Amino acid sequence: MYIVNRITICLMVSLCLCSNRADGQGNYFQMLLQGLSKSQVPSSGNILSAAGSLFRNYQDEIIGYVGQTLTSGLESVSPNTTNNLCLNHTELFIKALLRRENWALRMVDAFGKPGTGILDYSVNWIGNYDECIAIQATAYQNPVAKEGPSTPYTGKYCTASFPFGPPTSMGQLALKLGLCVPDSCSKKDITGIVNAVTDLIPQNMTNIPLPTANVDCQEKSLEFTDKALAVTIVGGVFVALILIATAYDIIFQHCLSKAPENSHANKCYLKSFKGIENGAFDHPKAKESMENEQTEVVQTEKEKNGFTDVENTAIGRQNSPKPYKPGIPGNLLLSFSLYTNAPKILNTNQPKGTLTSVNGIRFLSMSWVILGHTIGFGIPHTSNASTLVPKLFKRFTFQAILNGTVSVDTFFVLSGLLVSYISSREMKKRGGALKFNWPMFYFHRYWRLTPPYMLLLMLYVPTYKYWGDGPAWPQNGIERNECEDTWWKNILYINNVYEAGGYNQCLAWGWYLANDMQFYVISPIMLVPLYYSSVAGGAVCLILILVNCIGSGLISSHYGFASNVLFEQDSVGIMTKMHFTPWTRIGPYVVGIFTGYLLYKTECKVKMSKLTNMMGWTVATAVAMSVLYGLYTPDGTPPDLSNAVSALYNATSRTAWGLSVAWVIFACATGYGGPVNALLSWRAIIPLSRLTYCAYLIHPIVLYSYNRSLRTLMYWNDLEMIYLFLGNICVSFAAAFVLSLAFESPMMGLEKVLLGRKKNS
């Protein structure tokens, strides 16, 4: 009944403002209400049927009544809260509506209207955004004769939200109604008008006090701020630099540096060389004669008959043009070349000693993250969420999504493993930890992560609001105050611990990068002891894991957190106290550190019996499955666990997952991966693996842009979700490729030129 009362309000304010169709077959209003009056809905059916009959039989009277009500509402609006121009234009709309003028009817047609699924909480009635903003009002000096037309205003789209029910961890449930209003009206004006009109609705129609409406309006054009202008200029400089570098690379490196095919250097004949008879190449004689004539001959591969391929013999003379070699300025410019950087990203070759299975795990984990965010970000933009979500929660297979936060722990394992494996090899090469270049150890990591991170933040935050439009497009941007007071926490990588709650984060998904950087900073306290002593290093790793598990358990027990972040009522509390903090997430990273050390120590050469290998895979699979699916309940409700059991799960689950992932990498690297290693080491995955960092940075922006630009709500089923997920993967990695070419690859190239750093395996 509570919802039906709300619906009655909107029926009175919105749906009754309809007119006869030109084809003479009635109007949308009549057809909808006829369907409602015929429907057999328990309890609320009688009310809807009565309303339908009332509106159908007394349409003209109701339109007149609504017109009078709106007029009375305008008269009751305080001039201090609503400007006169807005009131005048709204009055013009009402009069044109009563005269059944086309543009006024279109404004009403653009209003949000009830659809199906009302009793399933489908109460987000968007309306028609594009129809609304295309409307041009017409005013006449003589309305009867329609003389002296003018266009005093155009349509503007607004959304009025009527909250009901208490706030929950999933947000505030509210009835949302799309409105088409004059563009001369501000958000404040429409709020005053909507609340004035709803106050005139008799209280006996609803039996409850009406809530105050919250109104949000979409402006047709936004003023270009100084920040956005500055960022656009910087972006233009990068584009120009990339184009110039690419042209320089193609022209000077790959065109002018090559001798023409018909040059004298390429014109040679076999008979002109001493010591060469019948095409046979006599090395001693040829060498001697060529030295005397100051000529250099490079022998290419031989034909099957043993003769040298003369056509491919390269001959150079002292007076031949030397290949162009750019200096430091040229190499700095080449760092931005698409022609050079794109093949590096797409190259499927890797140096000897590379842990190839890491590529597949990295890509699959990134895909898992995108899958979880596709569903999490998209559900608020669906019309069947109230029926879809309970069904999904009841599925056993959906537990991989509900517990998908461990996908980030996979990245922690990979990060720790690679840091340990590569650093240990480098320390051995340099002769110990004391001779290791620790300043470069830290600088390289900061330089590797920060430029793409900060440049994306710089471009995205001030300009995002200009990227698109739509009924749900955030015209103030996604980030609060455009990260004016919070960006510095990201560049220092402390955004996960310093004022991390609520809306105090800039690029909220950057919490993972902060954790990873913090773990990297303290990694030498594990790396150095491990290098000199397995026992000492293992003890340090064990202590850190115990601190992680005990700390996580105590925090979870103290606050009474649920075993799954999605089931926790205090969502902000569990995120800031357990999900973001490094002391509750370091366990998988330590597991990765120790696994990388084992691979370094054994040089990836380990002998295991078939029984041992099988037991390892069985235990790892069982542990991983228990972490993902151990909280399943057939009815989809949170598992009935005591506070102690929930604390135990929160304390151990992430480290247990890390151990399972570590086994997969260890088995694959030592030759016991079988088909799993073949899949994870597939060469086609290598370029995608290189793009995972940029994909992580940019994929939430891709998802935001799609969801917020929708004109209508989505209606999800399995096929729709799969299709959307695959689309998000493709667009996210395509955007990551562009981001890598623009920011990541050039910065790595600059480091190599300026510091002479060679790429690690």
Image (cartoon, rainbow, N blue to C red):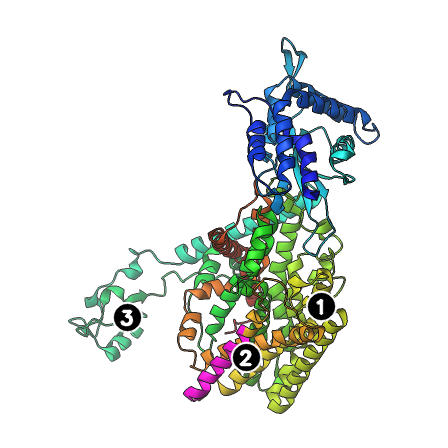
CB within 8 Å, label 1 to label 3: no
> Which residue bears the numbered disc 3?
300
* Magenta-drawn stretch contains 239: no
- Coordinates of residue 478 in the picture (x, y in percent): 67, 49
> Which residue bears the numbered disc 2?
421
Closer to the eye: label 1 or 3: 1
Is 50 on the left or on the right of 558, as rendered? left
Closer to the eye: label 1 or 2: 1
Which of the pair 242/228 is nearer the observer?
228
Is 649 on the left or on the right of 689, as rendered? right
- CA separation in Å, label 1 and label 3: 71 Å
Q: What residue appears at the point 66 percent right and 31 percent down from the top-left corner?
A: 14
Q: What residue appears at the point 23 percent right and 72 percent down from the top-left corner?
A: 302
**SS assignment at label 1:** loop
Crowding around mark 2 (Cα neighbors within 10 Å: few <14, some 14 to 19, many 20+) is many
> Which residue bears the numbered disc 1?
561
**Label 1 sits on what residue type?**
Phe
**SS assignment at label 2:** helix
